[in-house]
Image (cartoon, grey):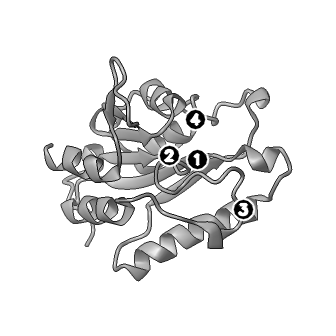
Amino acid sequence: MPMSLESLEDRSAIFFDRDGTLIVDKVYQKDPAQTEYQVGYFELITFLQRAQKFLLFVVTNQSGIGRGFFKESNVMAIHDRMNQDLVAKGLRPFQGIKLCPHRNEDQCQCRKPMPGMILELLHEWKIDPTKSYMVGDKLSDVEAGRAAGLAQNILISETSQINLTSVPNLLKLVEYFQAL
């Protein structure tokens, strides 16, 4: 079902980090067959899609491309696998997936904690940042969301962080969004 938002200005989104948030972080993963989802991944996406309140995006740093460990086509194959697995469960693919191929030392505007990927999606999809969220497992994810002016930035962490909204796992994130 399409989103039931009244107008483009009312669009809300959730921006997810990929590695360590949605899928298990396997350093410099390049093989889609190695994709392993975090506990609660399909439950979270199912809940959010049924709620029809948010567009869902992935924003991911993939410095392995810039370091020459793998090609962008390897990363795209993992993203294709993620979307195919959603469809196989009767869900819709992500609205979009953005990646930053750069290394830290490249000092680009797209590598988190810089907000470039999020800002691009906000503009392209006419999303209201004050009604949108960033979810990630690293402070750089939270910092990117803050720099983009998002309403809430959620850290997936077993330990509470001062001045941060944090939940221990994706199943608890479902509860967080149910309470909204």
Label 3, label 4: how far apart the Cα atoms are: 24 Å
User: Decide: marks 1, 2 in contact (CB < 8 A)?
Assistant: yes
Reading the image, the residue beneath label 1 is: 60
Label 1, label 4: how far apart the Cα atoms are: 11 Å
Q: Residue furthest front?
A: 158
Reading the image, the residue beneath label 4 is: 116
- Which residue is at a point 28% across and 63% down the rendered structure image? 49
Whole-percent x, y for residue 57 in the image: 45, 53
Quadrant in which the C terminus is drawn: top left
Label 1, label 3: how far apart the Cα atoms are: 14 Å
Type of amino acid under label 2: Asp
Label 1, label 2: how far apart the Cα atoms are: 5 Å
Q: Residue furthest left?
A: 179
Which quadrant would residue 1 be assigned to in this image? bottom left
Which quadrant would residue 135 be assigned to in this image? top left
Q: Secondary structure at mark 3?
A: loop
Mark in front: 4 vs 2? 2
Type of amino acid under label 3: Lys
Reading the image, the residue beneath label 2 is: 17
Reading the image, the residue beneath label 3 is: 30
Whole-percent x, y for residue 64 in the image: 76, 48
User: Decide: marks 1, 3 in contact (CB < 8 A)?
Assistant: no
Q: What is the number of the mark on residue 68?
A: none
Label 2, label 3: how far apart the Cα atoms are: 17 Å
Mark in front: 1 vs 4? 1
